[in-house]
């Protein structure tokens, strides 16, 4: 799982410490492909993939490496020329996996659906909201984020079916309510899907939420404590009551499973250093046997003495990669072969 930093956000106004030539797409694109080759995963879940770069660069490059690709752009208008909008992409190794189903989740559409049904306001106050309140809530939740949900089948003798979800949750730290609302919608959609199919799930993405956040607590524990400080930040009353934050997916972070804790950081800029990217899996179905270690802090700026991106690292995020085995029903072991997810 890797937020590759879209070209539309890669500029010296945001990253003044990075040389202009190292921020150029012509330079960063070759570094990104080099990193992808080094991961050598069976599945790549990428975020901040610019629409025109998917069509003009990534799809052909990844096809030449043996992958097929799926793309879903954010639901906002392009920034200037057509294609200048980012989104999520999933690439999978054609020789090992067969695509069976594909779906997308548009969080804007989910908010509009709730607004039409009169359910966009959480109604914790017990009163019926006014139309201006509904409009304000809809505007607050309309951040254009998306998710991809796909079903694969392995091409070995096990013919193991499983689900992969790739998402990018809203970035702004002043919108904790929106992050939590989007995550709640995502999990509810995955639960509905899982009731029908009962498949192992691997959930990847940039959740823009640290391990102490409400988003992480909900994902990793299946519940959310009523006293969590994030719940106090809900200006439009869009966040459900804490009792409604329940799920039975039994998601476990790959890093916690293997290393006992999350890495120190997955996003490393001058203004922020912390962990906000994760690979989760349903622990009843999937066993994580290893992770690709995040480089130590001293190596990130070894040659330039700057944060990311820099000439060695093409994104402000670091890619995550994990090896998974499927747990066979009724057994005490694992089977189905190894699967690398990056």
Image (tube, rainbow, N blue to C red):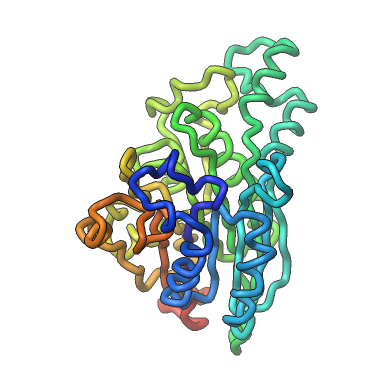
Residue 338 image position (x, y, % from top left): 46, 80
Lateral position of residue 88 relative to residue 216, left or right: right
The residue furthest right is 116
Residue 223 image position (x, y, % from top left): 46, 40
Front in this rendered view, residue 226 or 45: 45
Lateral position of residue 212 relative to residue 37, left or right: left
Residue at 40%, 32% in the rendered image: 225
The residue furthest left is 298
Front in this rendered view, residue 315 or 42: 315
Q: Does residue 181 sit above or below 2 in this rendering? A: above
Residue at 69%, 42% in the rendered image: 80
Lateral position of residue 69 relative to residue 177, left or right: right
Residue at 38%, 26% in the rendered image: 229
Q: Decide if residue 282 is in sight here.
A: yes
Q: Residue 273: which quarter of the image?
A: top left
The residue furthest bottom is 157
- How many numbered tags mark residues here? 0
Q: Residue 97: which quarter of the image?
A: bottom right
Q: Does residue 317 sit above or below 62 in this rendering? A: above
Residue 286 image position (x, y, % from top left): 47, 68
Residue 76 image position (x, y, % from top left): 69, 40
Q: Decide if residue 327 is in sight here.
A: no
Front in this rendered view, residue 30 or 109: 30
């Amino acid at each position: 799982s890797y937020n590759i930093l879209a070209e539309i956000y890669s500029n010296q106004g945001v990253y003044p410490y990075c040389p202009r030539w190292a921020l150029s797409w012509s330079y960063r694109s070759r570094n990104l492909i080099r990193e992808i080759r080094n991961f050598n995963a069976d599945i790549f879940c990428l975020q901040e993939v610019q629409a025109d770069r998917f069509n003009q660069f990534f799809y052909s490059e990844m096809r030449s490496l043996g992958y097929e690709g799926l793309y879903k752009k954010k639901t906002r208008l392009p920034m200037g020329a057509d294609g200048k909008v980012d989104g999520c992409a999933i690439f999978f190794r054609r020789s090992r996996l067969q695509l069976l189903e594909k779906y997308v989740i548009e969080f804007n559409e989910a908010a509009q659906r709730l607004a039409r049904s009169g359910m966009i306001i959480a109604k914790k106050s017990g009163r019926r909201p006014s139309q201006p309140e509904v409009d304000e809530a809809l505007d607050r939740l309309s951040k254009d984020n998306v998710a991809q949900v796909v079903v694969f089948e392995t091409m070995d003798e096990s013919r193991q079916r499983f689900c992969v979800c790739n998402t990018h949750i809203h970035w702004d730290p002043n919108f904790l309510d929106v992050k939590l609302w989007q995550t709640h919608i995502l999990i509810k959609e995955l639960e509905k899907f899982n009731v029908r199919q009962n498949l192992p799930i691997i959930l990847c993405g940039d959740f823009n939420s640290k391990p102490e956040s409400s988003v992480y607590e909900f994902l990793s524990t299946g519940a959310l404590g009523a006293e969590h400080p994030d719940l106090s930040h809900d200006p439009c009353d869009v966040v459900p009551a804490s009792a409604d934050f329940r799920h039975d997916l039994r998601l476990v972070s790959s890093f916690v499973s293997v290393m006992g804790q999350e890495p120190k950081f997955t996003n490393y800029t001058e203004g922020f250093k912390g962990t906000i990217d994760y690979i989760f899996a349903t622990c009843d179905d999937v066993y994580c046997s290893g992770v690709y270690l995040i480089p130590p802090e001293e190596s990130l700026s070894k040659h330039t003495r700057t944060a990311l991106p820099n000439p060695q690292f093409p994104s402000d995020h670091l890619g995550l990669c994990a090896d998974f085995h499927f747990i066979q029903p009724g057994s005490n072991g694992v089977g189905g072969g190894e699967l690398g997810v990056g």
